[in-house]
Amino acid sequence: MYQKIIIMGNLGRDPEMRYTPQGKPVTNFSVATSRKWTNADGTPGEETIWFRVSAWGRMAEVCNEYLSKGRQVFVEGRLRPDPETGGPRLWTRQDGTPGASFEITARTVKFLGGRGEGVAVEPGVTPEEPPPGVEEGEEELPF
């Protein structure tokens, strides 16, 4: 079995990099994807979905160095379900409304033009190793 998710959107905040106790770098950032449409009555509609992205290894270092709030990015990876619910991570916002986030472990990240910068400016960086807890070759298809 195999699953892949591809998103393209804008960073909602600057990336944050940290190191695991074993010294492996991990960078987290949020990406907003949006779509707009016109309803049958002529009123505009809009939907924004937020994703939390984790990049590991060398890719984490490059993302931390080159990405910033507002930058457009292309991310390919796998969805990481909440261990308790098996779905998106759920929480209650400060105003009492429910919230959910979709978590992605990045396999490829491509930096796109941001805020008027234009086309792709960096090639994708693929991870050198899988994140902790993932066995080597687990993400590879056997055929």
Image (tube, rainbow, N blue to C red):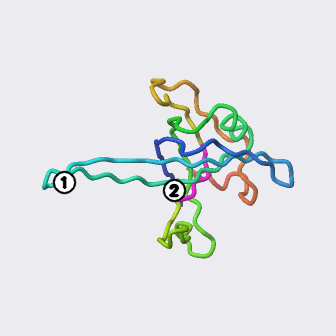
The amino acid type found where label 1 is placed reads Asn
> Do the residues under discs 1 and 2 have CB atoms within 8 angstroms?
no
Q: Residue at x 68, y 41 (%)?
A: 127
Q: Nearer the viewer, residue 74 or 43?
A: 43
Nearest to N terminus: mark 1 or mark 2: 2
Q: Where is residue 132 in the image (x, y as percent from the top left)?
A: 76, 56
What residue type is disc 2 on?
A: Gln
In the rendered view, does 61 fall on the left or right side of 91? right
Q: Mark 2 points at which residue?
A: 3
Distance between the Cα atoms at labels 1 and 2?
32 Å
Q: Dividing the picture into quarters, in which one does residue 110 lie? A: top right
Mark 2 element type? loop
Is 110 located above or below residue 133 in the figure? above
Is residue 95 magenta-colored?
no
Question: In the drawing, does residue 33 fall left or right of residue 79?
Answer: left
Bounds of the magenta segment: 102-107
Indicate which disc residue 52 carries. Answer: none
Quarter of the figure with residue 14:
top right
Q: Where is residue 133 in the image (x, y as percent from the top left)?
A: 74, 60
> In the image, residue 37 lies at what x, y percent?
25, 48
Instruction: Name which residue lies at 13% across and 55% down.
Output: 41
Say which element carries label 1.
Answer: loop
Of residue 139 and residue 53, the one placed in the foreground of this image is: 53
User: Residue 8 at x, y = what percent?
Assistant: 46, 42
Q: Is the magenta stretch mostly helix, strand or loop?
A: strand
Relative to 107, is 52 above or below?
below
Q: In this view, does 5 lie above or below 127?
A: below
Residue 81 placement: quadrant: bottom right
Taking the spot 51% from the left edge, 65% from the top edge, the residue there is 100
Instruction: Return the residue nearer the eye: 81 or 137.
Output: 81
Say few, some or many: other residues with alpha carbon within 10 Å of mark 1 (under 14 / 14 to 19 / 20 or more): few
Q: Mark 1 points at which residue?
A: 39
